[in-house]
Image (tube, rainbow, N blue to C red):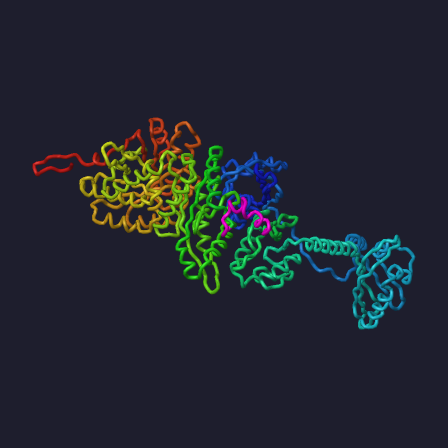
């Protein structure tokens, strides 16, 4: 077994924040255990890693610490740089060092422990014990009145061992306790009762020592023949306790010299220490006088809103080094002071979190003095969050800086569902109290770098900066979960609601105008609300080249094409590249026609963002499927030829739990077998909603249809999805196909996905085959089907119909 230290390099923004963890790996490459810090470094809970292969946390095989090049350096005491895979999928470089190495085959020597019998202890061991523990042994023979000392007794009195000294002279070294020691020894001789007392000694060198003197009767048969005991030096412990008392007095004086409210708690929220100011304020607000050892949650049991908020703040304090919030200590009808509360995490010498401390300062006067100034102008008076004007300024500044950053930004617009009923059911003013409490909880949940604002009424906005799209979706879902689970207790009522949200991904083509961005996010929120509430509707921001007027015109064209069943259908052929396969394999494509002859036909990149923004994606998917099936119904002679017909699905359809019923009804009376129809699901959607996608796959399989994973290879999740997701076809993402011929890394990625698919019994499709070189490479790798302009360009669906043939019995086809 080997113990390794993993040290993750500190970031440029916080050079002091080195993170490290320790893991133990056996000789078979299995992780035996990990310490509690592995979550901060690798993203895994320590129990999740137990029993897993070390490859779970490594980026590639060459990063294995057991390969010869790494093993030699580690055994020489040199750290090595290794690329690790975080639980969330990203890679990072960290230093790996060997701490302890023990071969698993090493067995402990056969040995046993037995209790020592009455045999005398070797004098050398006795002297070693006395010197190590600073004690001595004494013994009084009652008959001869002779006292025997071990060397330790002499050392405690700073005398040379064996020095001539009488018992009476020895008593002078403890003048304050002479009478008491004599009395205890006489009582022990008379009654056999043992004793133990603290004694202050003044040694031969005039040093003061604090010792503990113990004694007990030593009997021979029923008669007490001797009295013996020990004298243990406790000077160090005495001074330690004295120093601790002095420190406590100094700390108490310092804490009580301030009007700030100071409280320290352990991990279980038990009070460790607090000052007088905190005690008085806590009693005033919660009608409980706190005592050291009391539990904070128990004392606040009658105040559920404040208790939940307090528990979340303390939990955040345990997880972060420090942070600051501004809020009143309780939510009451009367106006309470506003406090600036600093939280600081407490850790022991081993780096383990032991608790946290808070220092709360009344800043009401500061806010009152600035009420007419910037603070009032920038913040919402009800919740304390920044207001709409300030948020738009931050959003504008972020849009300007976006060009200089690699990360993506997202905008979340939130609207509380059925919020208006709160004031009706619980009375006027209750809504504001709910919003204030909810805002405090949201402020704890969001990242410190992000901006949270109350726009107006029951609408909020959150700017999620420098965050990948999957993580932004997760943050939006977490906030929706928080709102859904938030319960506000008011008198005898519990107020609870949900929220609808619009999540706008602000890519490189997003407009710079913050009002336009906010409008697009609000439109997404509106579609989420009209689609059933309590959900997030997400889409990419429309290009800054598309103004509101153009957007409305495009929307009208899409709506007209849907209402009149006038979508233009095209198909692109999928052709076998590894072996010959009979029949037609097609993917259905859609275009939106113009309303006049002068209007150009809309391509998917022009109309899909509009359809997503106005919640028309689901209707568009169904319309494409219905029009295609109706066309096939008119050309029944295609039935022997058509072996595959694929449709792309939007996220709205993927999350539609009634889509399976729609497909079953649509295929019911069609002469084509259900298994020729394949529904294609984007890899990004499967990554974001794995459970929902798995359910949809099972539902479509029950109908008889096939399912394809489209865009495989776009992220590291593709390999897991290709192996585990119940799909039938893996379609490779065009990004890993673009430079396939001259990029060996992409060739390895494609080959890996193909092998995973084959092992799982799934077919593979290579997209974006644009030239002969790409086709040859795909064929070499063994991919089953190809798709792209080199094989077939998109063509009108009507060109697929059978040729018209005139027979004596009549005409067929056409």
Closer to us: 563 or 475: 563
- Location of residue 37 with respect to 136 vertically, above or below: above
Q: Where is residue 75 in the image (x, y as percent from the top left)?
A: 62, 38
Task: Judge whether residue 377 is colored magenta.
Answer: yes
Image quarter in which the C terminus is found: top left
Closer to us: 478 or 737: 478
Q: Residue at x 25, y 41 (%)?
A: 560
- Location of residue 159 with respect to 593 vertically, above or below: below
Q: Residue at x 65, y 54 (%)?
A: 259
Taking the image as shown, residue 268 lies to the left or right of residue 673, namely: right
Task: Judge whether residue 759 is colored magenta.
Answer: no
Taking the image as shown, residue 253 lies to the left or right of residue 805, namely: right
Q: Position of residue 793 (x, y in %)?
A: 28, 31
Q: Where is residue 15 in the image (x, y as percent from the top left)?
A: 60, 38
Closer to us: 498 or 317: 498
Labels in figure, total: 0
Tell me where residue 295 sits by quadrant: bottom right
Q: What stretch is highlighted in magenta?
A: 363-383
Tell me where residue 176 sits by quadrant: bottom right
Q: Residue furthest left?
A: 808
């Amino acid at each position: 077994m080997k113990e390794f230290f993993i040290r993750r390099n500190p970031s440029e923004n916080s050079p002091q924040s080195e993170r490290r963890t320790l893991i133990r790996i056996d000789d078979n490459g299995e992780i035996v255990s990990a310490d509690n810090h592995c979550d901060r470094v690798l993203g895994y809970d320590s129990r999740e890693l137990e029993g897993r292969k070390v490859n779970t946390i490594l980026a590639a095989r060459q990063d294995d610490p057991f390969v010869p090049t790494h093993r030699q350096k580690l055994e020489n005491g040199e750290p090595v740089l290794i690329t690790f895979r975080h639980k969330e999928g990203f890679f990072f470089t960290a230093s790996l060092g060997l701490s302890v190495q023990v071969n698993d085959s090493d067995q402990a020597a056969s040995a046993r422990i037995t209790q020592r019998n009455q045999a005398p202890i070797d004098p050398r061991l006795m002297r070693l014990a006395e010197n190590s523990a600073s004690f001595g042994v004494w013994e009084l023979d009652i008959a001869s009145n002779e006292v025997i000392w071990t060397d330790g007794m002499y050392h405690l009195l700073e005398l040379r061992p064996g020095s001539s000294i009488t018992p009476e002279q020895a008593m002078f070294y403890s003048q304050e306790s002479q009478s008491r020691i004599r009395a205890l020894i006489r009582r022990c001789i008379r009654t056999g009762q043992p004793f133990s007392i603290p004694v202050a000694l003044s040694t031969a060198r005039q040093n003061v020592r604090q010792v503990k003197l113990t004694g007990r009767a030593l009997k021979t048969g029923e008669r007490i023949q001797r009295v013996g005991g020990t004298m243990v030096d406790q000077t160090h412990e005495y001074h330690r306790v004295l120093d601790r008392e002095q420190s406590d007095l100094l700390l108490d004086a310092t804490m009580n010299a301030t009007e700030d409210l100071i409280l320290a708690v352990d991990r279980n929220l038990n009070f460790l220490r607090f000052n007088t100011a905190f005690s008085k304020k806590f009693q005033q607000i919660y009608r409980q006088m706190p005592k050291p050892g009391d539990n904070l949650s128990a004392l606040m049991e009658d105040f559920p809103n404040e208790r939940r908020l307090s528990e979340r703040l303390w939990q955040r304090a345990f997880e972060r080094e420090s942070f600051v919030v501004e809020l009143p200590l309780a939510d009451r009808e009367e106006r309470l002071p506003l406090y600036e509360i600093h939280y600081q995490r407490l850790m022991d010498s081993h780096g383990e979190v032991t608790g946290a401390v808070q220092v709360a300062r009344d800043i009401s006067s500061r806010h009152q003095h600035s009420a007419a100034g910037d603070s009032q102008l920038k913040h919402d008076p009800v919740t304390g969050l920044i207001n709409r004007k300030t948020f738009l300024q931050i959003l504008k500044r972020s849009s300007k800086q976006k060009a200089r950053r690699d990360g993506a930004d997202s905008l979340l617009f939130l609207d509380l569902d059925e919020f208006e009923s709160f004031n009706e059911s619980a009375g006027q003013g209750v809504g504001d109290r709910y919003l204030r409490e909810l805002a405090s909880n949201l402020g704890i949940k969001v990242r410190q770098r992000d901006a949270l604002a109350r726009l107006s009424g029951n609408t909020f906005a959150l700017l999620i900066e420098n965050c990948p799209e999957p993580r932004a979706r997760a943050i939006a879902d977490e906030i929706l979960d928080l709102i859904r689970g938030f319960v506000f207790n008011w008198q005898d009522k519990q107020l609870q609601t949900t929220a609808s949200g619009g999540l706008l991904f602000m890519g490189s083509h997003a407009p710079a105008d913050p009002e336009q961005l906010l409008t697009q996010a609000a439109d997404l929120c509106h579609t989420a609300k009209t689609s059933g509430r309590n959900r997030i509707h997400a889409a990419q921001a429309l290009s800054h080249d598309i103004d509101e007027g153009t957007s409305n015109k495009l929307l009208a064209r899409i709506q007209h094409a849907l209402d009149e069943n006038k979508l233009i259908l095209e198909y692109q052929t999928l052709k076998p590249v590894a072996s010959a396969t009979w029949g037609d394999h097609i993917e259905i494509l859609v275009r939106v026609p113009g309303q006049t002859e002068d209007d150009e036909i809309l391509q998917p990149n022009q109309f899909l963002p509009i359809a997503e923004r106005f919640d028309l994606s689901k209707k568009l998917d169904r319309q494409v499927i219905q029009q295609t099936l109706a066309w096939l119904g008119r050309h029944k002679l295609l039935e022997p030829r058509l072996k595959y017909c694929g449709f792309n699905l939007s996220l709205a359809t993927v999350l539609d739990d009634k889509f399976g019923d729609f497909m079953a009804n649509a295929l019911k009376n069609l002469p084509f077998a259900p298994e020729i129809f394949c529904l294609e699901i984007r890899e990004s959607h499967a990554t974001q909603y794995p459970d929902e996608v798995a359910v949809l796959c099972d539902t479509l399989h029950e109908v008889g249809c096939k399912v394809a994973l489209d865009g495989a290879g776009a992220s590291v999740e593709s390999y897991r999805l290709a192996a585990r997701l119940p799909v039938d076809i893996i379609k490779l993402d065009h990004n890993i196909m673009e430079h396939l011929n001259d990029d060996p890394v992409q060739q390895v990625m494609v080959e890996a996905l193909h092998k995973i698919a084959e092992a799982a019994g799934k077919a593979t499709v290579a997209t974006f085959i644009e030239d002969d070189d790409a086709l040859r490479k795909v064929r070499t790798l063994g991919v089953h089907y190809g798709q792209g302009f080199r094989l077939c360009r998109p063509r009108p669906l009507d060109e697929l119909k059978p040729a018209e043939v005139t027979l004596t019995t009549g005409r067929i086809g056409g």
